[in-house]
Image (spheres, rainbow, N blue to C red):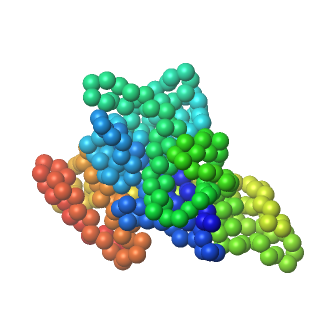
C-alpha cells in the first residue's frame, strides 16, 4: 500500500508518493514537480497549472490565483479584503462570503473559492492516477476542514492533515531521537507569498507549536516582482520606453522573470526573453544569479 502527500499552498501545489520507505515527488503532465495553484476559466473549460498562469496576460479577469488566502473566510475578513485588492479577478459578496465573478460568454458566473480549490486537487490527483496508490494523506497549513472537503470532493481519501512545520520535522526525522526526551526546533519556510518561522517542541513523537510568526512582505513572488522591475528598468534604459505602468507588459515581464528565477536555482545565469513586450519590440536580457 502507498500513501500520497499533497501540499496545497498559496502559489503552488505538489504531490508525492510514499511507498517502500521512500517518498518521491510526482511530476505533472508538463514534467514539472510543482504545479502553479492557478485556475483559469474559459467559455468551455477550466485550466489549472502552468498554462493558466502563463495565460493570465490575456485572461487576467477570469484567472483565480492565491485561492487559499480566502478559503473559509467571510467577505469582511481583512485577508479577503487584501486579496480583493491584489487580484485582477473580481471578488464579490454573496451572502457574506467571497465569490469570484467570472465572465463566461455574455453572462457572469459566480465561483466559490472551494470550487477552485477542488479543481487544483483534481489536477494533483491526475498526476498520480497512473500510479498504484490506495490512500491519500493531504498536507496543508491551515483551514483544515475546507481543504479536507475540497480534497475529498476531488476523489481523495484523506487519512491525516499535518501542520507544515511538523511535516518538515517528520520528513527529516528531526527531534525524534533526542537523548533528553524533549527538544526544541526552529522551522522556517520561505513560500510564494510569505516567510514563516515556527518554534516547536518535540517530545516522544508529539509536536507542540510554541510560537509562530509570518511576514507577508517577503516571499517568492516578491523576488519575482523585484526582478520584473529590474527588467522594466533595463528595457527603459535600452529602448527609452517606460512599461512599469503597463499592466499587460508587466505581466509578461513577471512570467519571464519567474522562468528566469527558476533557472537560476540551478544555473549561474539565465536568459530572459519576452516576445513583443511593447510596441512590437522584443526584449532579451541576461540575468546572473
Residue 143 as seen in the image, left or right of residue 265: right
Residue at 36% x, 70% y is 263
Establish if 53 lies above or below 19: above
Q: Residue furthest top?
A: 95
Image quarter of the N terminus: bottom right
Tell me where residue 203 sits by quadrant. bottom right
Residue 209 as seen in the image, left or right of residue 280: right
Residue 87 as seen in the image, left or right of residue 106: right
Residue at 13% x, 48% y is 279
Nearest the viewer among 172 and 269 is 172
Residue 82: x and y in percent read: 51, 37
Residue at 56% x, 57% y is 6
Residue 62: x and y in percent read: 35, 37
Establish if 194 lies above or below 67: below
The answer to whether residue 271 is seen in the rendering is: yes
Residue 70: x and y in percent read: 54, 38
The answer to whether residue 163 is seen in the rendering is: no
Nearest the viewer among 225 and 152 is 152
Residue at 38% x, 71% y is 264
Establish if 192 lies above or below 185: above
Image quarter of the C terminus: bottom left
Tell me where residue 61 sits by quadrant. top left
Amino acid at each position: 500500500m502507498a500513501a500520497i502527500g499533497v501540499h496545497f499552498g498559496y502559489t503552488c501545489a505538489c504531490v508525492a508518493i510514499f511507498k517502500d520507505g521512500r517518498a518521491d515527488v510526482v511530476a505533472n503532465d508538463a514534467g514539472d514537480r510543482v504545479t502553479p495553484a492557478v485556475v483559469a476559466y474559459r467559455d468551455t473549460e477550466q485550466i489549472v497549472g502552468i498554462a493558466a498562469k502563463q495565460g493570465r496576460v490575456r485572461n487576467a479577469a477570469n484567472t483565480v490565483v492565491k485561492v487559499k488566502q480566502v478559503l473559509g473566510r467571510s467577505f469582511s475578513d481583512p485577508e479577503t479584503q487584501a486579496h480583493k485588492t491584489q487580484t485582477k479577478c473580481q471578488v464579490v459578496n454573496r451572502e457574506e462570503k467571497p465569490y469570484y465573478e467570472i465572465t463566461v460568454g455574455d453572462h457572469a458566473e459566480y465561483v466559490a473559492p472551494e470550487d477552485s480549490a477542488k479543481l487544483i486537487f483534481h489536477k494533483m490527483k491526475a498526476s498520480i492516477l497512473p500510479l498504484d496508490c490506495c490512500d491519500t494523506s493531504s498536507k496543508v497549513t491551515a483551514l483544515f476542514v475546507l481543504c479536507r472537503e475540497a480534497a475529498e470532493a476531488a476523489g481523495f481519501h484523506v487519512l491525516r492533515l499535518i501542520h507544515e512545520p511538523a511535516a518538515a520535522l517528520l520528513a527529516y526525522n528531526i527531534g525524534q531521537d533526542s537523548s533528553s526526551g524533549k527538544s526544541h526546533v526552529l522551522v522556517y519556510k520561505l513560500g510564494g507569498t510569505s516567510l514563516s518561522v515556527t518554534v516547536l517542541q518535540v517530545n516522544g513523537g508529539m509536536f507542540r507549536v510554541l510560537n509562530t510568526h509570518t511576514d507577508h512582505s517577503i516571499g517568492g513572488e516578491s523576488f519575482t516582482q523585484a526582478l520584473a522591475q529590474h527588467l522594466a528598468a533595463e528595457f527603459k534604459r535600452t529602448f527609452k520606453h517606460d512599461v512599469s505602468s503597463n499592466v499587460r507588459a508587466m505581466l509578461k515581464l513577471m512570467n519571464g522573470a519567474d522562468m528566469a528565477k527558476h533557472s537560476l536555482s540551478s544555473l549561474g545565469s539565465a536568459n530572459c526573453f519576452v516576445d513583443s513586450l511593447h510596441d512590437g519590440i522584443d526584449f532579451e536580457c541576461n540575468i546572473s544569479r
